[in-house]
Amino acid sequence: MATKYDRVYNYNAGPAAVPLEVLEKVNEQWFNFQGAGMNVMEMSHRSKEFDKIHNDTIDRVKQLLNLGDDFHVLLVQGGASTQFAMIPMNFLGEGDVADYINTGTWSTKAIKEAKLFGDVNVAYEGKDVDFMHLPTQDELKFTDGARYVHLTSNNTIKGTQFRTFPNTNGVPMVMDMSSDIMSHPMDCSPFGMIYAGAQKNLGPSGVTLVILRKDFAATANEAVTSMLKYQTHIDKNSLYNTPPTFSIYLMGEVLQWIMDNGGLEGMEARNQKKADMLYGFFNEYPDYFKCPVEEASRSYMNVCFRLPSEDLEGKMIAEATRNGFIGMKGHRSVGGLRISMYNATSPESIEAVIAFMKDFMTKNG
Ligand SMILES: *Cc1c(COP(=O)(O)O)cnc(C)c1O
């Protein structure tokens, strides 16, 4: 293959591609990080070298998302799945109600956890339309006095995405942004909390970013076990116990790469360009390529599509793999094909896969 280091075109949904420039930089620093004489993973998490890496990573999150002093930025473990439980554990109690917008598998899982701690009102149920549509404002049924409104910004499995957010009349929104955080500029002020596992848009697995608005954090329940209590991590700047040091370092490098590539405006332009190319190509050949998601709800991170038959789908996935296009199989719960193209995926990569699919269509018309 003609790519540098014989790397494949990587459309994995997560863990997913990391910018090559980041891997090259990490490679240069592998044996001796900036004169420390060791790899970052060999450092004490209490050393001054790691302290700088840790705080630089947090500062970059604040800079990129324009977060003022009214937000905490935490780096925790356990993935977004642990957040599904930590959120109601910290913010729901007996007699409390939380509103949940159900737009797919991940929201469904978040709802299941919340029900263990308090009352859940499903403000929108997408199951009835197979999650192919995201609710408009007038389809949302909020509860008066809800503790928070939970939503999933990008539905990784079904391929839908909110890029503008509901109006919750001042009720703090809590949002799972695991698969599209830092993919476009946004105003964080209406959010009580934003969280994301790093392994889709921020680098490697093992670290979870939690952004908490201070006034919302101040309303949390007291009686929560230490590791699962946000206040513990707030008080200790996410260094209560050993953090995932290497993952934090890599996340910091990915954030630096975002800054070097135009920040969130740069990412949005890049992502829009890829989405226009790919959905545009599918629209040109609607008899061959079908996107089941309604147009207004389509994600520009995870593009799901079908071919005329399951046989052709299997054949395309196999031929794609042989040709170095990896990760194009749809989630096992959905079938079909999916191209995940997070920030790290280049427009050239999408150009290449379109050329491959066009050629496949010609040969298998
Ligand atoms: C991948 C994903 C998750 C699960 O993340 P883990 O880190 O594996 O727990 C949750 N929500 C969304 C939207 C995801 O894409």
Image: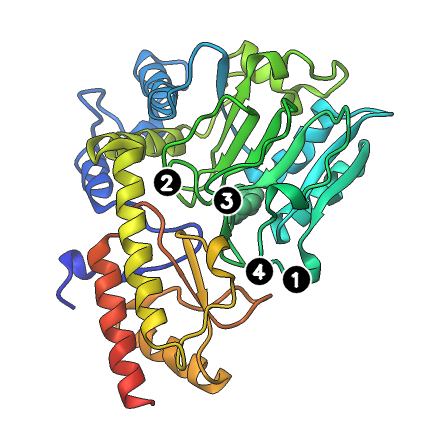
In the drawing, what numbered circle is on residue 162?
A: 3
State how far apart marks 3 and 4 are (Cα): 12 Å
Looking at the rendered structure, the secondary structure element under dot 3 is loop
Please name the residue shown 67% across and 19% down the image.
Answer: 226
Q: Residue 261: image x %, image y %? A: 21, 36
Looking at the rendered structure, the secondary structure element under dot 1 is helix
Q: Residue 47: image x %, image y %? A: 35, 14
Cβ atoms under marks 3 and 4 closer than 8 Å: no
State how far apart marks 3 and 1 are (Cα): 17 Å
State how far apart marks 1 and 2 are (Cα): 26 Å
2 or 3: mark nearer the eye: 3
First reached walking from the N terminus: tag 3 or tag 4:
4
State how far apart marks 4 and 1 are (Cα): 6 Å
Q: Amino acid at mark 2?
A: Ser
The residue pinned by badge 2 equals 183
Q: Left or right of 127: which side holds 80?
A: left
First reached walking from the N terminus: tag 1 or tag 2:
1
For ligand 1, which image quadrant applies? top right
Please name the residue shown 39% across and 34% down the image.
Answer: 247
The residue pinned by badge 4 equals 132
Please name the residue shown 62% across and 16% down the image.
Answer: 217
Q: Residue furthest front?
A: 138
The residue pinned by badge 1 equals 129
